[in-house]
Amino acid sequence: MNKIIILFLCLCCAVSAAMADNSYAIDKEVMNPTDANIFGHVVDKSTGEHMPGITIILKGTTIGTATDDSGHYMLKNLPEGEFTVEVSFIGFKTVTKKVKTQKGKTQELNFELEEDLISLEGVVVSANRNETKRRLAPTLVKVLSPTMFEKTNSTTLAQGLVFQPGVRVENDCQNCGYSQVRINGMEGKYTQILIDSRPIFSALAGVYGLEQIPANMIERVEVIRGGGSALFGSSAIAGTINIITKEPIRNSGTFGHTISNMDGSGAYDNNTTLNLSWVSSDNKMGAYIYGQNRYRSAWDSNGDGFSELPKLKNQTIGFNGFYKTSAYSKLNLEYHHMEEFRRGGSGMDLPPHIAEDAGLNGTGEAGLVEQLQHSINTGSLKYNIFTPNQKHNISLYASGQHIHRDSYYSAYGRTTDFTGVLGAQYIYSFDKCLFMPADLTGGIEFSHDDLDDRATDMQKYRDAALAEDPTATGQHLQELIDKYTPAPLHQIINIWSAYAQNEWKNEKWSFLIGGRIDKNSIMDKAIFSPRANVRYNPTHDINLRLSYAEGFRAPQAFDEDLHISNVGGDRVSIVRSPNLKEERSRSVNGSVDWYHFFGDFQLNLLFEGFYTKLSDPFVLSAPVEADNGSLVQTRTNGSGAKVYGGTLEGKIAYQNKAQLQAGITVQRSLYDNPEEWSADKAHLTDAERNSDKILRTPNLYGYFTASYTPVKPFTIALNGNYTGRMYVPHLLSQVDGRADVLVKSPDFFELGAKLSYDFKLTANMTLQLNAGVQNMFNSYQSDFDRGATRDSGYIYGPGSPRTYYAGARFSF
């Protein structure tokens, strides 16, 4: 720890020295205004209408503004020199113009923006840790925009992610609704989830975090499939999901509410959101405030008195602010707080221990309860420095997340987790490095995770001990209590990391070579993970990409370790083998991306192939009974595995009236040798208890979205998700003594529709009314287990039944 702090301080000193030559010029600009100004307007190229809220920045500086309600802007007292003015807005192509600012001179600079209906020119940061046009990024980056969340009525990150090619979100627990995201079929633990490019989404956060992040705090989500994003962390094996939070652009606000009903029942989902954006008149500071309040009733699909979807109460409040300390430096501060209560099972209105007790719950039968209450605080601080010559870009950052979780499953428990990240990054832009312009990126990072998970219901374990031996006292009683008390988990992980890469690039070619070295405190040696990427554009309309990356996962606790399921009324927990070693990966991805314009039509076709080889993959044994009577799964190293396949995606748009986007993925996920999925030796042969298939992974899945705007205020939107057949284990031997079964699930197709109409109340105020239905044909699992002894992990397919909804949103 001391070494990394010293290294960080040394880098800060180096940054200060590097900036010394520029500090006088910066101070001079602040103290002596130049009166070098730029003004103008921004209009829609197709309609000629002036556009409010358009972002205008002076590249290489922190200077920027947004057009006012009339579509005009002004930048005052600019530094002298040659600059590039960049104009951008979501859904439109980014436009740049060169300008030479001079002291005492005011210039007019007007812009026309053309709609980018297929997201060709959007800016991303996940490809190479630097802002890059998506078309020129060395790796393929898919972007999930606020428009997609809105058209599909996705109120959380989990709901929106399913509308990305090669991405699935699955519900893995009938009791609590634990979910995970799968990229290219690989489990959630293989995906690196980032918040504003920082790896503070811990294992504990990963259990329910996908459903806890509200859509109204998200500016965009950048998704990279495959291991080409390994610079963000060793866990980026299947891919990276980078959640970019909203920043203030201009003074504005929105307030909305949506009410949903599950299949005409008494189960409702109410979601209220608030967003406010403020920017000072001189554009030197701003703040974006957001909030969400959500309440969802529990949903019982088969009428057995036990929920299939848990009851939820979720509140989120947060802000993202900035302060421009000079024309070439900027300070960003982000913070959000979340409170969530979730409960599944039976007896929703009773205390958990009462609802489970057959003698106290009023039914005369044993109940089942899983209840969790989260309090989460997350924040980050970032300081960016540019130089007037636009050669240097330095970023210093610190991020942290603290989670407190109180839980109940057969007994009360408490889990706390603190995750912190401290780092620095430096980018140098070469006019020419050997044979081509290049960006050199280097950085250091230190991450710390302190996890403590323990049982607190000591009376419960004392009762269990006395039930075994009513005469036990003293040391014998304590030994019996210890037998029934789950072992606490206290894990402290420190990771020291350094990374470097160089990207040679122009409009036609991009060559990126880099790597990352990580020293995990629970491992004896540091591990180096290289990456390499090539992009070739034979024409402006065609992108060819090829990437190779290596990664690893350390033998530490993961999100599913902190989730408790049940089989046959017994809790199932996960322990790690003492001989567990790191898992290694090697990935290759290649893609062909074609864009074309046919008059008023914009078209994009994409094909991507992927192959990932896992060495010593982590696998879970079948549940077996421990000494205290509970069920335990052991994580061990498997023989090896491979995941391979391809994704085809297409987009077509006609003017701003109609759009269609669809993607389909075909893949295989196999172990090198069959792995055990069942311990049922009484009913099954060894061959039947083992499978070479990675379970819960369909070979075929996809999605589509479509929208039509016959007149400007009115939009019709459709969306769909297809999930192919897959093998799901059903542990019946623990439920009712029958043989365990590897079930081949049916396939599912969810179809949704939404109608929305915008009423223009004034020039600056709009009221939108909308209504729709999700999963309109109720394509949903029909063979759930029933009662308190059910196998809670036997769940597959769509995450919710047919749902009707209506909403209103006021914006200004």
Image (cartoon, rainbow, N blue to C red):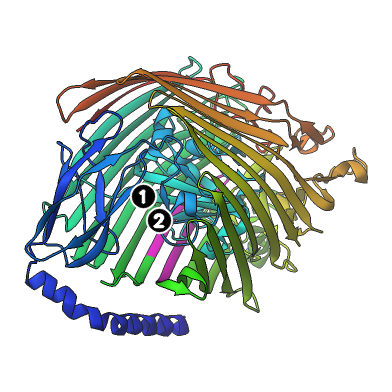
Please report the residue visible at 28 percent of the width from the left and 61 percent of the height from the top. 332
Q: Which mark is residue 641?
A: none
Q: Which mark is residue 245?
A: 1
Q: Nearer the viewer, residue 364 or 625?
A: 625
Residue range highlighted in magenta: 399-426
The percent position of residue 461, horizontal first and vertical second, equals 60, 53
The percent position of residue 200, horizontal first and vertical second, equals 46, 60
379 in relation to 528, above or below: above
Location of residue 75 by image quarter = bottom left
Q: Residues within 10 Å of mark 1 (few under 14, many from 20)?
A: some
Q: Disc 1, disc 2: CB below 8 Å?
A: yes
* Mark toward the start of the polypeptide (1 vs 2): 2
Location of residue 48 by image quarter = top left
Name the quarter where the C terminus is drawn.
top left
The percent position of residue 161, horizontal first and vertical second, equals 51, 39
619 in relation to 755, above or below: below
Q: What SS does tag 2 mark?
A: loop
Q: What SS does tag 1 mark?
A: strand
Q: Amino acid under label 1?
A: Thr
The percent position of residue 245, horizontal first and vertical second, equals 36, 49
Q: Amino acid under label 2?
A: Asp
Dominant secondary-structure state across the stretch colored magenta: strand
Seen from this angle, which residue lies furthest top?
A: 264
Q: Residues within 10 Å of mark 2 (few under 14, many from 20)?
A: some
The CA span between labels 1 and 2 is: 6 Å
Q: Which mark is residue 196?
A: 2
Q: Nearer the viewer, residue 480 or 284?
A: 284
Q: Nearer the viewer, residue 48 or 727?
A: 48
Please report the residue visible at 20 percent of the width from the left and 67 percent of the height from the top. 81
Residue 782 is inside the magenta segment? no
